[in-house]
Image: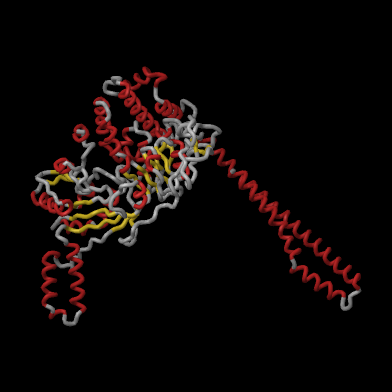
Amino acid sequence: MKRLIEKGLMYGNLIEVSSPQLVARYNRALKALIGRETSLTDFHIDLSGFSPEIGEELNDPWYLNPNGANRQFILLTTAQKSAPLLNIRFSTSRGILVQFIEANEAQLFALTARDVVAGELQGSVFSVEKPEQLFRMRRVTVEADTIGGHVADAEKLTTLIERFRAEPDGWRDESLIAEMIALAARTGDVTRVPINLPAMTFEQPDFWSALFGGIYIFQGQKFPAAITRRPMMEFGTLPIAQVMDFSHRNHIADWLERNQLVEPVVQARGGGPGGAGAGAILRQKMDFILVSVADQLGIEVGTARRTELRKLAYRLGEALPEEFLGLAAMLSWVEEAGPWPRISSEHPAYFYTIRARPGPDRDLVNMLLSELSVMDIRQLFITHKERFYEEYRGWSEVKRQYVADFLAREYMVDKEGARETLFGSEPKMDELARPELKPVPRTGAGMRAGEGTGAGMQGNRIAAGPWGKSLSGGAPDGDPGRPGAGLRNRGAAPCHRGRAVWPDREAQDAERRRGTRMIIGWIRLAFFMLIGLTIAYFLASIYSRSVRREKLEKHWQARALEGDRATFIERGMQAYEKGLKRRLLWLIYILPMVAFNAIFFYVNWF
């Protein structure tokens, strides 16, 4: 890790704490939060006030986050908002803290000028011992105050001032005045410079947690799901409709497509918009894969320049990994040298060819994709540093040197440009999702998770993936020879087994035009059908009325009834108009239209 630290790839942009006054303030906060102090006189802190040097001194890297669920923080300066957040347990923690500082920057600036501010990210649980407890953490409240209690004292002083003004004899109350003077000595004039640091509550329906080996929870999507890194059977029954693990690639691809969360990296071919940039991205991904293969096989690649890596590709020949071959076929299409490749979700290269669509969960989805394409070390470093550091520890020295040099040379010099090329212009990918701020009561226990129980993988429907039509075959995830290989739990929504396939864009446009023409044809048919039914209705109505009138005339003659014949027939026709037989004529409209819509629905969706 020393190599990463020296190149600014680890512990970069931390805030230095070296003045005796700031060290003393930090110790006061540390004593109040965990009952311990540091003997260090110079150290660095991250966004939350965590210091890796103090963590090493105390032999406790989680000293500000002991239970993993409610992270504590120490603010010495508002400049901490630009620092990274280390030891992340929840992907939303950084966004929450940054928003809290930005929303209260003026107050925090004034407070940190006189004291240290400490607080906590309070979830709806006190500890997370079971995976199902994560699904109750949909709301996080941030509460903070100085160690000297300036915010609490200011609130108390404000109350006393209001009382002093409201009571007619308040100026005679010496104890009240003395208490106000004592509080004002600590807080200052709160009538001119109010001190207010309200609690802020954030919603986090979608997030990643490092607990239990790593789990992605998406409760705010149209089709909720949980995606685990470890085998899903280890988690038992979870309170969400669908559960998958990283081995269920088809299911994950299908779920991403149904929620419209991803898009292809390649947007055009040749020199068109997105074409040239996509080619460079694909070539770099291929280089990363070759370096990983060389590291695994123990092959020396020198300085791992592109010419040396190309020689390695020639040497490996048919032994090249499928990820490399799939990206090579895609690159050939981009450079107008080959046909459009059909890369399904069963292909190892599939998740290397997609990225998250713009939206509130863009960084979280890219984080997930980076774990499904771990050989793309640049995307892994940008979107999921925790997993990057974990992978880094298992690499050889040669690969470590290559990766560190590449990131320092290609990424660190232009972070914004690299992120925009890889992921689009917004949002910033090294800043994790900012949960939405909600004006909700602070005392709420959190929103309930979905009522469904753990998810299973059931059914054998071949579903279309993000970029293509349904196929007629494909092996399901899991062991096809094992009964119940689909891992099914009762009460779960089905997770379709799908092959997500890249389509030919021209064919996709033609398919869209055919669909438009088909809908217009159905509308035209319905229009003429309605005209025909209207004509049939009026003819049937005229015929029915004539039959009824004829029956009334015959009835008058057969019974030799007394009275006016015309009046009798008129009353009979009025009764007919209000009767059931007359209303049954509406079935001429109803039955054909019901049949028409049923056929239309069946043909297009089944």
Q: Residue at coordinates 21% horizontally, 74% vertically from top-left?
A: 162
Residue most extreme to the top: 315
Quarter of the image that includes the C terminus: top right
Residue most extreme to the bottom: 168
x and y percent of residue 296 in the render? 32, 24
Q: In the rendered view, tell whether residue 205 sits above or below residue 388.
A: below
Tell me if I can see residue 411 in this picture.
Answer: yes
Q: Nearer the viewer, residue 304 or 432?
A: 432
Q: Is residue 225 left or right of residue 537?
A: left
x and y percent of residue 212 in the render? 32, 42
Snapshot quadrant of residue 144: bottom left
Snapshot quadrant of residue 441: bottom left
Q: Is residue 527 left or right of residue 84?
A: right
Q: Is residue 58 left or right of residue 590?
A: left
Q: Nearer the viewer, residue 53 or 447?
A: 447
Snapshot quadrant of residue 512: top right
Q: Residue at coordinates 34% horizontally, 49% vertically from top-left?
A: 134
Q: In the rendered view, tell whether residue 574 sits above or below residue 22.
A: below
How are the residues colored? Answer: secondary structure
How many labels, in total? 0
x and y percent of residue 481 in the render? 49, 30
Residue most extreme to the front: 483
Q: Nearer the viewer, residue 361 or 582?
A: 582
Quarter of the image that includes the N terminus: top left
Q: Residue at coordinates 28% horizontally, 39% vertically from top-left?
A: 386
Tell me if I can see residue 425 in this picture.
Answer: no
Q: In the rendered view, tell whether residue 410 sits above or below residue 196.
A: above
